[in-house]
Image (tube, grey):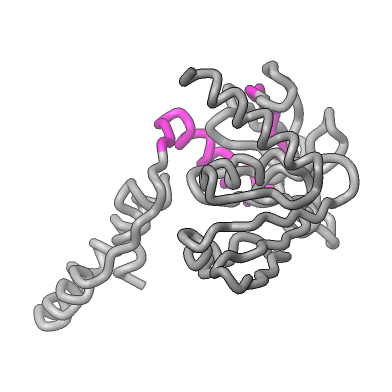
Amino acid sequence: MMVLCHELGDGTGLPYYSSARRAVTKLENSLPKRLKAELQQVSNSVEIKFNPVAQTEESKETYQALVDAVGKKRCVRISYRSLFDNETIQTKLSPYKLLFSRHSWYVIARSSIHRAARTFKIGRIADLELTDDTYQIPAKFSIAKVLKNAWHMIPEEGPDQRVVVRFAPLVASNVAEVQWHKSQRIEWNEDGSIDFHVTVSGLREMSWWILGYGDKAEVLEPPEMQEIIAHHAKGILAKYQ
């Protein structure tokens, strides 16, 4: 437990968890000398590497305000820089859950203007005001229902779509070794390549992942994903011609 608090609370693991590290330091100071020495050896032998994160001090205050709001079941009013709407929106949230995923903290909350549970990136919340209005979390609420089959965090409207991507032998093992999505299925081909099958709620998020493998990934279906990848590839090529 102490090793995890050290690793996750050092400012580069889970942002805003430095209080966990401070608490562990206090616990360590109360340990007998022999146990301190053993703990030091174990701590030095374990390291957890996260992807780079950049959370500002302003976001830290927002994060803490949301923790308090969830604890007290109080609604908040926010100004939010929405990439999807391409503008700053004003909405009242009933925050259900805080979620850290990959690089950032998110709050999953019912939004007054969307009239449904949505995911908001905490770093994009410009202003936050705690209100006196209270709420209850629905008994049937779950993160899985909100995210549906999104590739990561952004489910899109419309039916889920089946995607098949063929990865070349050079990267096939690396792809096959990771559980990228709950619905994935791997088929190995005789030449050492794999066919990666997945069902997702929206194609845009996944398209960026596919592009990261360059010419070692080929979309076999659906045609809509082929068009998205081809469009980006033409744009990339145009920049270098």
Residue 177's x, y, as percent? 51, 69
Residue shown at 70%/41% (left/top)? 119
Residue 193's x, y, as percent? 57, 65
Query: What stretch of residues is rendered in magenta?
Result: 54-81
Q: Is residue 32 visible?
A: yes
Q: Is residue 71 magenta?
A: yes
Q: Quadrant of residue 196?
A: bottom right
Considering only vertical position in the picture, is 61 above or below 190?
above
Relative horizontal placement of residue 19, taking residue 115 as reference (left or right): left
Considering only vertical position in the picture, is 145 above or below 224?
below
Residue shown at 69%/65% (left/top)? 184
Residue 162's x, y, as percent? 80, 55
Q: Quadrant of residue 38?
A: bottom left
Residue 114's x, y, as percent? 84, 32
Residue shown at 35%/66% (left/top)? 4
Q: Is residue 135 visible?
A: no
The foreground one among 160 and 27 is 160
Q: Is residue 17 magenta?
A: no
Q: How many marks?
A: 0
Residue shown at 43%/36% (left/top)? 55
Which corner quadrant holds the N terminus? bottom left
Relative horizontal placement of residue 74, taking residue 16 as reference (left or right): right
The foreground one among 165 and 185 is 165
Q: Quadrant of residue 129?
A: top right
The foreground one among 224 and 81 is 224
Relative horizontal placement of residue 9, taking residue 207 as reference (left or right): left
- Outermost bottom residue: 34
